[in-house]
Image (tube, grey):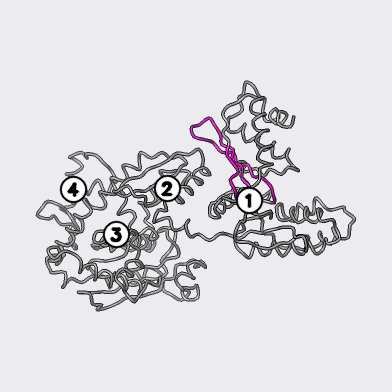
């Protein structure tokens, strides 16, 4: 590329650079033997120019794949490297090594790859493996599927182990497949292999997937027009011209769009050149989240950045409102890269209901049903939900002599507030049933706790800033069902009190709708669970309404909704609300 384009890409700058700076950079390039200047005046790495006039049938490539402990380079580590050396579609050598990451492998990665901690404990560290890999690759072009993600992991390992970065010419099969087969909307390696009818499928093992990538690459090369397969040079020029401009320059153009995105809560939508939606996401800082997609490409998004042409954003008052808008967009538009939300499994809950024949029943449930049962959770995993369900059933057995309502109150309090709250509330009772229940709770060595206040028929109030500033949204939720939303602006004491009192009266008596999708309900419950200690999340129990009103008044005062001239702090709000 030209000196100006090289400087802009390296410095992530747009606009015209000072001529003195460009001359200085060109002098450095001339003096550095690692770079060479083409006849056209453009610059590139010298090793890229070796044998560029040889026909593609005589060109040697190394096809690379890595397996890691997660999807974020710089945070997660490499656990396996695999590579095959190929020429004219034939494998002539291969490289494979496990890598000790110095950290545990999660259950999800173990299930995905089959690579366990036991397999890695005696594996070599990253540094020696990189040395062997570099020797295997030598100076030939490197091919990979979403190769930028693999190179990011290799770069991080090289920095940690004080090795040089891999600077070979790279070819991305995602880019190549997007150029040749634009109808493949999300060209993952599995889809590409299926498109070519390959018997071998990706296994999330480095050598196997490198071989599958090599087979796909050979078939992709066969589809390149004849005039562009004459040499490596003509092939690379054709591939780059198909993108309209080099990828670093495209990234620079996208970075220019990103700089105009505010660092505020909201949703962002990635679109291709035809306006089709590729991906929708949310964040409390739109600019930082969108920028991360370009700076740290994830292999879950193979081909997305190559197709990205326009970024649309919608500002919301809070991240919770962005969550609701994101779910709505994904349901309506079904973006091809939003597979995580489309297929994300629901986390478990504890379900409590009354049976006419058997009394109060407790079980775990992975779904929220539109029924009369009370749901507690979500819990981190099924084991945590099962543990709480077992303790609840033991409490029911121990308190069988109590009235049904007392039984329900004790179990509900345990599930919503924890064993300590039950002991504090019920101690001093002379009933043998209560004494037996408290003994069970005192012997517990652990407690898997859901949202403070629980979902046992309670309405949850969430109070967040609105857009534009100066107003707030009141979201009323029950069992993950969005009952409704109200907007409040700066108000007088009388108006604020009347509005809030009407909201509480209305939403506490409102029946739960059966129309809400399980996925959206799960995400709402997950949000409430994760933010259970946030002052914005307020459980509204009719039996403890004053606590909810106190918390709501403090939250509104903190957000500046209470007009100072007409209201003297949260005590005045409470007085108005409680009448």
Q: State how far apart marks 3 and 2 are (Cα).
A: 28 Å
Q: Which residue is mark 3?
A: 183
Left/right placement of residue 36 relative to residue 184 reads: left
User: Is 285 within the magenta?
Assistant: no
Q: Which residues are magenta?
A: 456-485
Q: Which residue is mark 4?
A: 3
Looking at the image, do the residues carrying marks 4 and 1 touch, with CB atoms under 8 Å apart? Answer: no
Label 2 sits on residue: 289
Where is residue 183, by image quadrant?
Answer: bottom left
Disc 1 marks which residue?
479
Which quadrant holds residue 354? bottom right
386, 522: nearer the viewer: 522
Dominant secondary structure of the magenta stretch? strand
**Mark before the other along the chain sequence, 4 or 1:** 4
- Quote the CA–CA distance across marks 4 and 2: 30 Å
Identify the residue at image location x=74%, y=32%: 578
Q: Are marks 3 and 2 in contact (CB under 8 Å)?
A: no
Disc 4 vs disc 1: which is toward the camera? 1
Q: Secondary structure at mark 3?
A: loop
Give the residue drawn at x 20%, y 56%: 240
Q: Residues within 10 Å of mark 2 (few under 14, many from 20)?
A: some
């Amino acid at each position: 590329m030209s000196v100006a384009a090289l400087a802009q890409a390296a410095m992530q700058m747009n606009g015209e650079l000072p001529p003195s700076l460009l001359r200085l950079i060109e002098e450095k390039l001339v003096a550095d033997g690692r770079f060479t200047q083409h006849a056209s005046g453009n610059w590139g790495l010298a090793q890229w120019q070796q044998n560029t006039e040889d026909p593609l049938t005589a060109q040697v490539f190394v096809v690379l794949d890595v397996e890691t402990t997660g999807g974020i380079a710089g945070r997660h580590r490499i656990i396996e490297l695999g590579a095959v050396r190929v020429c004219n579609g034939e494998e002539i050598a291969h490289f494979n090594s496990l890598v000790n990451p110095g950290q545990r492998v999660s259950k999800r990665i173990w299930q995905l790859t089959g690579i366990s901690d036991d397999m890695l404990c005696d594996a070599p560290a990253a540094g020696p493996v990189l040395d062997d890999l570099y020797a295997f690759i030598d100076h030939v072009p490197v091919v990979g599927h979403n190769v930028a993600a693999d190179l990011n992991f290799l770069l991080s390992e090289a920095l940690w182990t004080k090795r040089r970065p891999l600077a070979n010419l790279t070819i991305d099969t995602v880019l190549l497949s997007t150029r040749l087969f634009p109808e493949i909307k999300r060209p993952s390696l599995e889809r590409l292999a299926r498109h070519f009818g390959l018997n071998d499928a990706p296994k999330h093992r480095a050598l196997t997937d490198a071989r599958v990538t090599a087979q796909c690459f050979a078939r992709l090369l066969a589809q390149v027009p004849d005039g562009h397969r004459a040499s490596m040079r003509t092939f690379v020029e054709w591939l780059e011209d198909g993108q309209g401009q080099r990828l670093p320059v495209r990234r620079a153009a996208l970075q220019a769009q990103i700089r105009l995105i505010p660092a505020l809560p909201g949703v962002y939508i990635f679109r291709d050149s035809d306006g089709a939606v590729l991906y929708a996401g949310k964040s409390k800082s739109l600019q930082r989240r969108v920028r991360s997609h370009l700076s740290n490409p994830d292999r879950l998004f193979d081909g997305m950045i190559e197709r990205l042409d326009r970024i649309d954003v919608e500002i919301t008052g809070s991240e919770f409102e962005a969550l609701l808008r994101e779910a709505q967009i994904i349901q309506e538009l079904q973006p091809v890269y939003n597979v995580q939300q489309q297929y994300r499994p629901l986390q478990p809950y504890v379900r409590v209901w009354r049976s006419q024949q058997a009394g109060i029943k407790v079980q775990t449930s992975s779904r929220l049903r539109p029924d009369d049962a009370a749901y507690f959770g979500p819990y981190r995993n099924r084991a945590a939900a099962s543990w709480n369900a077992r303790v609840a059933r033991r409490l029911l057995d121990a308190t069988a002599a109590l009235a049904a309502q007392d039984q329900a109150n004790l179990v509900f309090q345990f599930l919503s507030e924890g064993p300590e709250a039950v002991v504090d509330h019920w101690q001093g009772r002379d009933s043998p049933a209560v004494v037996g229940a408290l003994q069970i709770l005192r012997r517990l060595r652990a407690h898997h706790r859901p949202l403070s206040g629980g979902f046992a028929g309670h309405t949850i109030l969430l109070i967040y800033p609105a857009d534009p500033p100066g107003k707030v949204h009141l979201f009323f939720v029950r069992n993950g069902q969005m009952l409704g939303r109200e907007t409040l602006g700066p108000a007088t004491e009388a108006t604020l009190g009347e509005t809030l009192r009407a909201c509480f009266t209305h939403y506490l008596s409102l029946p739960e709708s059966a129309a809400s999708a399980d996925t959206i309900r799960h995400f709402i419950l997950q949000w409430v669970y994760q933010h259970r200690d946030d002052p914005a999340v307020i459980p509204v129990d009719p039996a403890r309404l004053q606590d909810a009103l106190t918390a709501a008044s403090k939250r509104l005062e903190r957000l500046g909704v209470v007009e100072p001239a007409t209201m003297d702090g949260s005590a005045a709000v409470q007085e108005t609300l409680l009448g």
